[in-house]
Amino acid sequence: MRSIVMSMVLLSCATAPVVRPEPTSPPPPVAKVEAPVAPVRALPTLPPMKLVVLPTPGTPIVSVRLVFHVGSVDDPPGKEGLTALTTKLLTEGGTKSLSAAELNEALFPMAAELVSDTDKEFTVIAGRVHQERFDRFLAILSETLLAPRLDPKEFERLKTEQLNVIRNRLRSENDEELGKVMLDALLFEGHPYRHATVGTESGLSAITLEDVSNQWKRCFTKARLVIGVAGAANDTLGAKVVTALETLPATGAAPTIIPAPPKVANQTLIVRRDTQSTAGSFGFAWPMRRDDPDYALLFLGLSYLGEHRQEHGVLFRELRDRRGLNYGTYAYGEHYRQDGWSSIPRPNIARTTQDLTLWLRPVEAKHGVFATRGALFFLEQTLRAPLPAERFETAKGFLAGATRIWTLTDQRRLGWAIDELIYGTPGFLDRVRTTIASATAETVQRTLQKHLDPKALNFVFVTKDADSLRAGLLSPAPSPITYATPKPPEVLEQDKTIERHPLPMVSDQVRVIDAADVMK
């Protein structure tokens, strides 16, 4: 079955916090430092076909999650997109005994699910089915990996789908996703993370069916596999899955070694595209991962600053709620991808090197410079001004509860449990909640100050009038804003400071490119 394209729905807190007025004076300047650079610190090596079993009493549904240590970093040069295409052909292209259509027809009456997803370093193949039909489902699942059909027609169909994601969805439709893809390209020039998991136009065009066959044999091996079963599952059922996949190759190509990213700071890329709005993606690569002692406090601090789609976040409240500039502005301490239709972070997006990002969802083009100034102003204010107690306690309560929601389904429980193995962080969410309970605004702010430097940010914008935006970002002149509806006096007064907030861009580090030229 085809993976569901992610969509977004608005979620908000049940109650709005009582908020103290924010100071309107600009925060003290943050000292300039070099961009954070992640060391070459490999993820833990796991035993082949490591098994995770998480029974759920009372459920008749079995969930299976296969996580392979293979991703777009394993795409050969000139064949960008190969791993994602290989995964799709395995799970959607049919098996030795079933055509692609017959595969769907076999899964449908069982009410079974079979989906896949490829990220930079890991690929997930996941499924669920009623326990009474598990044996038949396991036979199908194992055949997708052990005896895929590798049908030339399905290969061409799926390759065309990936090319259309680049040519249509990213270049022509989705400003936000295009901005995130180009931020990766900016942060990771010359690095295995640089290209999007979907690939490049020339890379996909060069891929042959033989390339897919070789990638399957080289990378989808027992040495790279973690197996998870949950729900109506026990050790016996887990052993059955292990046995079913026993004839996978033991080893193949060695996993790609992830080098340190380049030092990139204060670079700006403006992508010119025919769109009515301006979207922004800001960030830098950093060494911060879940296995760092400071991560839990940063997790809380960034949730306070801008949790995805949650109104308690400073950026959401100030730029959306109080000023109506956009749908939302958020902050993430690791690479964020939402899980399906929810706002919950998808598990198994584990990476050797992570990134800190701010996501400025599209604003009216005329407000692009002001919104950028606003995002930086409130970021620096969070680092320097005292954190209001009521808002900080709201953030603590939200994150403590949200981390429980993140593991409500069996697939998510498996995902987080496997992430704990990948990062070497047993009991991660429990430890986060323990840290949250004792955290103070002062300790969180000190941790943010220690690791988060606004001067290290890089900027990607997607907009129509790229030249005008470039001029506005480089100009020292104020960028005043007018509103279609009345705003409180304190907002208007604070805007006088924001419109003059200094921007870090310098002329020779601001580039403009056309959307038609990206991902070629």
Image (cartoon, helix red, strand yellow):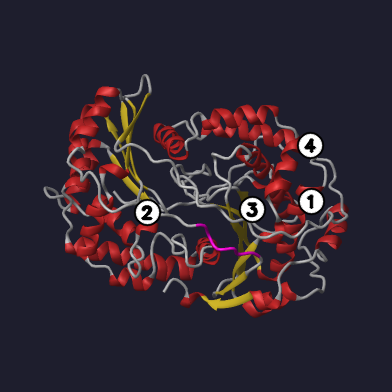
Name the residue: 22% across, 54% down: 93
Callout 2 amino acid: Gly
Within 10 Å of the Cα at label 1, are there few (<14), some (14-19), or many (20+) other Cα atoms? many
> Is disc 4 surrounded by few (<14), some (14 to 19) or many (20+) residues within 10 Å?
few
Range covered by the magenta-colored residues: 260-265
Q: Which of the two residues, 125 or 310, is positioned nearer the viewer here?
A: 125
The CA distance from mark 4 to mark 3 is: 20 Å
Kindly report the distance in space between the C-alpha atoms of the residues bearing marks 2 and 1: 38 Å
The reply, left or right, for residue 122 in relation to residue 393 is left
In terms of secondary structure, where does tag 4 sit? loop
Of all residues, the one furthest to the front in this rendering is: 40
Residue tagged by mark 3?
A: 328
Q: Is residue 434 left or right of residue 83?
A: right
Q: Position of residue 71 (x, y in %)?
A: 37, 54
Please tell me whether the stretch drawn in magenta is mainly helix, strand or loop.
Answer: loop
- Type of residue at label 1? Gln
Q: CA distance from mark 4 to mark 2?
A: 45 Å
Mark before the other along the chain sequence, 1 or 4: 4
Give me the residue at 64% from left, 53% from top. 328
Q: Position of residue 8 (x, y in %)?
A: 52, 50
Indicate the amino acid at tag 3: Gly
Q: Which residue is mark 2?
A: 71
Residue 18: give its label. Answer: 4
Can residue 244 be found in the magenta stretch? no
Quick one: which residue is furthest to the bottom in this view? 467
